[in-house]
């Protein structure tokens, strides 16, 4: 009988739920103890690895800050090594190292809070040591703390990826019920291990006519029923109850697990920033709508300009080399202006480095008429894997690493687009969406990069684009924008498609 590997490295025989339940009722150790390191040892390894990554990031940030301060003609400040350990205490204080329950955007926010506490502590310690406070000290500590955030973010992401591969990251999690909502949640957890919830199987509480019919494609067995929860609670930290799998509060109170989490899908689309509000004797969820507030749009605009100007200065030499290469390889203009639809439906022209032949449109129509598969791909994605319009060599390199998008920093400075937002599409692309979504999309500033670009990028069809853009609009925050900006270079290096 074929075996299916589980998320914890186990192999479960592909048997029905009744056989799996009977097998679990035997004596002896449960299936989790043989597959997962002891909980305390596993958590200690994860904590030490994350702390080491942050300490390394602090030392790297200190070195960069000293170089920057020295470049400004100010005397660099030598900081004692013990301050790096203080950063770990700051991150522990804000709860950054929680194994589960934090999304990547929330981790970024907590990292910034911890870096702020670290900056205050470092300033106080250095000022006390020097018996004075001066401009050079303030400038270096400010830059030091600011650099800790992105460097620590990348270091933490890398370490977490290694821990996931080693099957050390995440806490054993069971799903209550085997209905469609539990199966959907199980698929999501298997696809997103960075959230720290490692599904090990289903527990059937509510009686269902055909409990396994919806989950046959998942490598997760039925590990128990209602009578098994006491035994299973010794090995499982978290149970998730999805949707309407159980509606009895008495059933919830009887569950002996350390954490019982009710998973509810947000109304009208996904959401990661719901706020719980007290309502008399009950509670309600406050759906975020931050991007529609004037003050938040002003903050977003200030963030755009404060980042776009230094980015243009830093990237100017690279942009000069790209422009020269295009001029040498292909006769014609260096830049290409493409008509797109901006906020409130206003037409805008985005700047790009030219990566196509001058007669690109004629080449496209000829190719689509000749190749039915290419036409189907174009109608689905509005992109082609083998695009005859692209200049050989330099054109494909620019597109592969999204370097052709760099001139759009000028569009950002003009206020036509934002650094982060739904990508501005041509009118023909938008016609593939329904009218309601087009109105939603037009209500926010388009962006140079976006949530779609760091997740599915151009591999996603129109439905994927709609889901990703809807998520961004409904969950906007400054932290989400900063997270997308930090993730964009990783997506570009992975080269999963052009922005």
Image (tube, grey):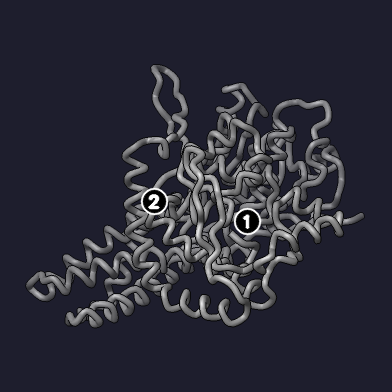
Image side of residue 307 versus residue 397, left or right? left
Q: Where on the picture, by quarter, is residue 330?
A: bottom right
Taking the spot 89% from the left edge, 56% from the top edge, the residue there is: 2
Mark 2 highlights which residue?
A: 415
Element type at mark 1: helix
x, y percentage for residue 64?
A: 33, 77
Taking the spot 68% from the left edge, 68% from the top edge, the residue there is: 390
> In the rendered view, would you say 314 is above or below 410?
below
Residue occupying the far top of the picture: 280
Q: Which of 179 and 373 is in front in this view?
A: 373
Image side of residue 146 versus residue 133, left or right? right
Mark 1 highlights which residue?
A: 457
x, y percentage for residue 97?
A: 44, 57
Image side of residue 274 versus residue 71, left or right? right
The label nearer to you, 2 versus 1, is 2
Which is more N-terminal, label 1 or label 2? Answer: 2
Separation (CA) of disc 2 from disc 1: 24 Å
Taking the spot 55% from the left edge, 63% from the top edge, the residue there is: 336
Image side of residue 197 versus residue 416, left or right? right
Q: Which of 232 and 467 is in front in this view?
A: 467
x, y percentage for residue 76?
A: 21, 81
């Amino acid at each position: 009988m074929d075996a299916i590997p589980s998320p914890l490295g186990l192999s479960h025989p592909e048997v029905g739920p009744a056989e799996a339940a009977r097998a679990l009722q035997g004596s002896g150790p449960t299936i989790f103890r043989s597959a997962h390191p002891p909980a305390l040892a596993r958590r200690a390894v994860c904590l030490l690895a994350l702390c080491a990554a942050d300490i390394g990031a602090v030392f790297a940030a200190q070195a960069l800050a000293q170089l920057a301060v020295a470049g400004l003609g100010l005397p660099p400040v030598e900081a004692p090594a013990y301050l790096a350990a203080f950063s770990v205490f700051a991150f522990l204080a804000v709860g950054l190292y929680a194994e589960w329950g934090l999304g990547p955007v929330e981790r970024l926010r907590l990292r910034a809070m911890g870096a702020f506490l670290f900056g205050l502590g470092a300033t106080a310690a250095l000022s006390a040591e020097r018996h004075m406070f001066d401009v050079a000290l303030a400038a270096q500590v400010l830059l030091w703390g600011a650099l800790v955030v992105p460097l620590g973010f990348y270091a933490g992401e890398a370490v977490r990826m290694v821990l996931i591969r080693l099957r050390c990251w995440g806490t054993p999690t069971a799903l209550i019920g085997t209905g469609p909502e539990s199966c959907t949640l199980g698929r999501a957890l298997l696809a997103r291990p960075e959230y720290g919830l490692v599904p090990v199987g289903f527990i059937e509480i509510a009686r269902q006519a055909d409990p396994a019919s919806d989950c046959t494609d998942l490598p997760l067995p039925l590990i128990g029923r209602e009578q098994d929860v006491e035994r299973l609670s010794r090995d499982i930290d978290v149970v998730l109850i999805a949707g309407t799998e159980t509606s009895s509060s008495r059933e919830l109170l009887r569950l002996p697990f350390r954490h019982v989490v009710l998973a509810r899908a947000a109304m009208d689309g996904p959401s990661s920033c719901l706020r719980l509000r007290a309502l008399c004797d009950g509670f309600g969820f406050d759906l975020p709508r931050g991007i529609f507030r004037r003050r938040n749009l002003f903050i977003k605009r200030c963030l755009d300009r404060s980042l776009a100007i230094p980015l243009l200065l830093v990237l100017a030499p690279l942009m000069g080399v790209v422009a020269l290469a295009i001029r040498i390889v292909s006769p014609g203009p260096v830049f290409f202006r493409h008509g797109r639809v901006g906020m409130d439906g206003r037409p805008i022209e985005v700047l790009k480095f030219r990566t196509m032949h001058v007669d690109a449109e004629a080449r496209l129509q000829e190719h689509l008429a000749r190749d039915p598969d290419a036409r189907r791909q174009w109608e689905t994605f509005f992109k082609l894997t083998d695009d005859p319009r692209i200049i050989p060599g330099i054109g494909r390199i620019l597109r592969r690493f999204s370097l052709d998008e760099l001139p759009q920093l000028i569009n950002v400075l003009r206020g036509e687009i934002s650094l982060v937002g739904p990508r501005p599409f041509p009118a023909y692309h938008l016609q593939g969406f329904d009218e309601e979504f087009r109105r939603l999309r037009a209500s926010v500033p388009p962006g140079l990069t976006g949530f779609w670009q760091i997740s599915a990028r151009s591999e996603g069809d129109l439905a994927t684009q709609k889901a990703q853009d809807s998520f961004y609009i409904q969950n906007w925050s400054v932290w989400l924008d900063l997270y997308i900006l930090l993730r964009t270079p990783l997506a570009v290096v992975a080269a999963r498609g052009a922005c």
